[in-house]
Amino acid sequence: MNNDDSAEIASELASLLRYDQVVLLGFIRALTIEEEISVSTMSELLGVGEEVSSKIMEKMIEDGLMIRGKVGYIPLHPRLALSNLYRIALARDDAVRVGRVRLDAITAMLVKRREDVQGW
């Protein structure tokens, strides 16, 4: 999995979890950043303005994809973040269970991506 497929993975996750694709794209791209992420960095990652980026990051915090750091934002470990989204999706629609196996596979790919960046 490489950065070129971030949009494709975000699209698939959005479909599986019935969630905002742009927010997922921002999360996936944030996994490749070693330091805390600023609103301006997220704007660059997504190609959107800082006002939009700020709203996206607040949504990530609200839904358990990111936490606030000392100077920016930090993405949660993919296993925890996607588990948070899965629980939210499942509460809205029990049919989300059907995609659990694929969600687990995507989660494993994202964990590897994060571990490669962090050197874990």
Image (tube, rainbow, N blue to C red):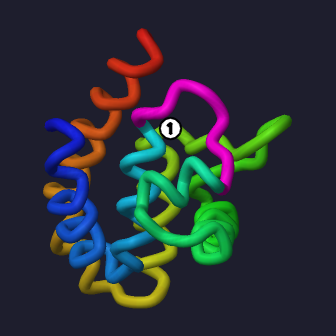
Residue nearer the viewer, 6 or 41: 41
In the displayed structure, would residue 59 be above or below residue 119?
Answer: below
Q: Residue 19 appears at what percent x and percent y?
A: 39, 79
Q: Residue 91 appears at what percent x and percent y?
A: 48, 83
Q: Residue 15 appears at what percent x and percent y?
A: 22, 78
Residue nearer the viewer, 103 or 94: 103
User: Which amino acid, by three-letter code, is at mark 1?
Assistant: His
The residue wearing badge 1 is 77
The C terminus sits in image quarter:
top left
The overriding secondary structure of the stretch rendered in magenta is loop
Residue at position x 43%, y 52% in the image = 45
Residue at position x 63%, y 53% in the image = 40
Residue at position x 61%, y 59% in the image = 64
Q: Residue 41 appears at what percent x and percent y?
A: 57, 48
Asked if the magenta segment contains residue 38, the reply would be: yes
Helix, strand or loop at label 1? It is: loop
Left-right relation of 81 to 20: right
The N terminus sits in image quarter:
top left
Asked if the magenta segment contains residue 51, the reply would be: no
Q: Which stretch appears magenta?
A: 32-39
Left-right relation of 33 to 36: left
Residue at position x 17%, y 74% in the image = 98
